[in-house]
Image (cartoon, grey):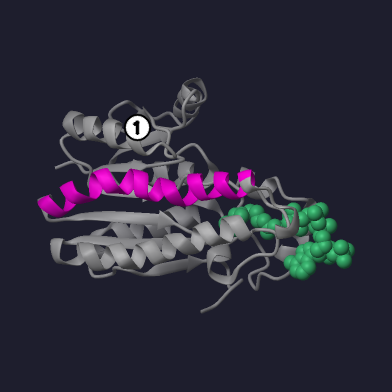
Amino acid sequence: MEKIALITGSKGGIGSAITSQLVKDGYRVIATHSTGKRECAQKWFEVNKFTSDQVRLFELDVTDTQQCAERLRQLLEDEGTVDVVINNAGITKDGVFKKMTAQSWKDVIDTNLNSVFNVTQPLFAPMCEKGGGRVINISSVNGIKGQFGQTNYSAAKAGMIGFTKALAAEGARSGVTVNAVAPGYTMTPMVEMMKPETLDFIKGQIPMGRLAASDEIAKAVSFLISDAGAYITGETLSVNGGLHMQ
Ligand code: CAA
C-alpha cells in the first residue's frame, strides 16, 4: 500500500530535495506551506513537475497549535493515515546575543521548535495506534556545537534533539521510530543569505572543503525512514562533511 509522508517547509532548499527523494521512493507527500504562500507553492509544484497523486499542497501555519490540531485531524480523515512526519520548517534570525531582540528569539523558537510539538502531536497517537511510523526532525550542526550569532537557532535545534530522544522512548513499543538529521552548511537559500566572507570562513573549517548538496541530506532521511532504518531510534545522524565530529 502507498505510504504517506508529511513534510513541513517543503519548498525550501532541503525540504524540496526531501520531497523529490520521497516521491522517488514511492511516497505520496503532503507538502505544507505557510499561510498566504499558495501561489508560490503552486509554482514550486509546477517547476518540479510533480503530479497531484505524488504531492498534495497543504496550507499549515506550523506556529499555530490550534490550527495544526484541526487541520491535521482533517488531513487524517481525508488521507486515512500519515506514516511519516518530517519536521523541516525552519528560519534564521541571526545576531549576537547582546543585540538580539525578544521577537527574533520568539520567532525562531516558534517556527523551529514549537512547530515540532504542533505538527507531531496530532499525528503521533494515530501512528502508535496503527503500530508503526516514522518521525524525522531536521536539526542542525549548530544545535550540536553552538554557533556564534545563533543563540536562538542553536537553542531550537538542540531542543529538537532532546525531543527526538524523549519521543523515541515513548514510540518504541508501538514501532514508531523518532530520529533527527543534523545537516551541516548546505547549499540552500538560507545559507546563501550569509555574508560571503562569513561563509568563506566557515567553509574553511569544513574538512571536506565544501558545502553539502541538499540531496545528500535527503538521502539520509530516506535511509532512516526505510526498512533498513527500522531498528534505529532516538539517534541524530550528522551530515556535515566533518565540520563537527561527536
Ligand atoms: N567566533 C568568535 N568571534 C566571532 C565569530 C566567531 N565565529 N564570528 C564573528 N566574530 C566576531 C567578529 O570578529 C567581530 O569582532 P570585532 O567586533 O572584535 O571585530 C564581532 O564578532 C562581530 O562580528 P560581525 O562583524 O560578523 O558582526 P555582525 O553584527 O555584523 O554580524 C552575525 C553578526 C550576523 C551573527 C554574523 O557574525 C554571522 O552571520 N555569523 C554567522 C552565523 C551563522 O553561521 N549562521 C548560519 C546560517 S545558515 C544555518 O543556520 C543553516 C544551518 O543549519 C547550518
Q: Nearer the viewer, residue 87 or 201?
A: 87
Residue at the limit of the structure toward the top, as seen here: 39
Say what secondary structure mark 1 lies in.
helix
Q: Main secondary structure of the magenta part?
A: helix
Q: Residue at (16%, 47%) from the top-left corner? A: 126
Q: What is the quadrant of residue 151 in the picture?
A: bottom right
Residue at the limit of the structure toward the front, as seen here: 102
Q: What is the quadrant of residue 131 in the picture?
A: bottom left
Q: Which residues are magenta?
A: 103-129
Query: Is residue 109 a member of the stretch shown in magenta?
Result: yes
Q: In this view of the protein, can residue 197 be seen by the observer?
A: no
Q: Nearer the viewer, residue 96 or 133?
A: 96
Residue 214 % position (x, y): 52, 51
What amino acid is found at the position of numbered circle 1 in the picture?
Answer: Gln
Image quadrant of ligand 1 equals bottom right
Quick one: label 1, few (<14), some, or many (20+) residues within 10 Å? some
Residue located beneath label 1 in the image: 67
Please give left or right for residue 48 compared with residue 222 in the image: right
Residue 105 % position (x, y): 60, 50
Please give left or right for residue 63 compared with residue 192 in the image: left
